[in-house]
Image: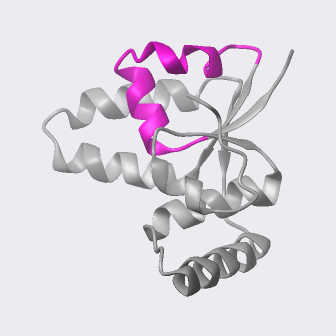
Amino acid sequence: MEMNYIIDTSAYSSFFKGDPRLKSYFQPDSIIYIPIVVIGELRAGFAAGNKTDYNEKYLQQFLDKPQVRVLKLSDKTTTIYGLIYARLKKAGKPIGSNDMWIAALALEHDYLLVTLDSDFKQIPDLLIAKV
């Protein structure tokens, strides 16, 4: 059965480190969406590390898979981002701006978010995988 998932940086990194909890989400019959924001976070980490070429090679191989799609920001994403920001600020529970962008994309497209990051639990209506 085909499923649509959106992954964050923690899910990508942990999967490629061999975390068995994520294996079921990275199957050939699943469509995996990776936000452009996540790709930016990954490349920032690669640039700051000492295995840039190695990490970039494996990221590109992942991005080239037919079931992997890059999600880009849209005008609708910015509206959802603004609502998330305002709600979290009012509740006194801010999270990182990149996480808010990822959540906005997941909400916009109504995709299940695969993450190991507990910050996302603060966002109402966000579908989060039980990893």
Q: Residue lying farthest left? A: 50
Q: Camera-side residue: 3 or 59?
A: 3
Q: Residue at x 73, y 73 (%)?
A: 80
> Based on the displayed image, in which of its 4 quarters is residue 111 positioned?
top right
Magenta highlight on residue 24: yes
Magenta highlight on residue 67: no
Prevailing secondary structure class for the magenta stretch in the rendered image = helix
Q: Camera-side residue: 42 or 104?
A: 104
> Based on the displayed image, in which of its 4 quarters is residue 96 positioned?
bottom left
Q: Residue at x 69, y 80 (%)?
A: 83
Q: Residue at x 72, y 69 (%)?
A: 77
Q: Camera-side residue: 32 or 84?
A: 84
At which x and y percent is residue 3?
80, 26
The count of marks equals 0
At which x and y percent is residue 76?
79, 73
Q: Residue at x 23, y 49 (%)?
A: 47
Vertical comparison of 20 with 57: above or below:
above
In the picture, the quarter occupied by the N terminus is: top right
The colour scheme of the drawn protein is one colour
In the picture, the quarter occupied by the C terminus is: top right
- Direction from residue 3 to residue 72 in the image, left or right: left
Magenta region, residue range: 7-29
- Direction from residue 94 to residue 108 in the image, left or right: right
At which x and y percent is residue 9?
45, 43
Q: Residue lying farthest front? A: 91
At which x and y percent is residue 123?
63, 62
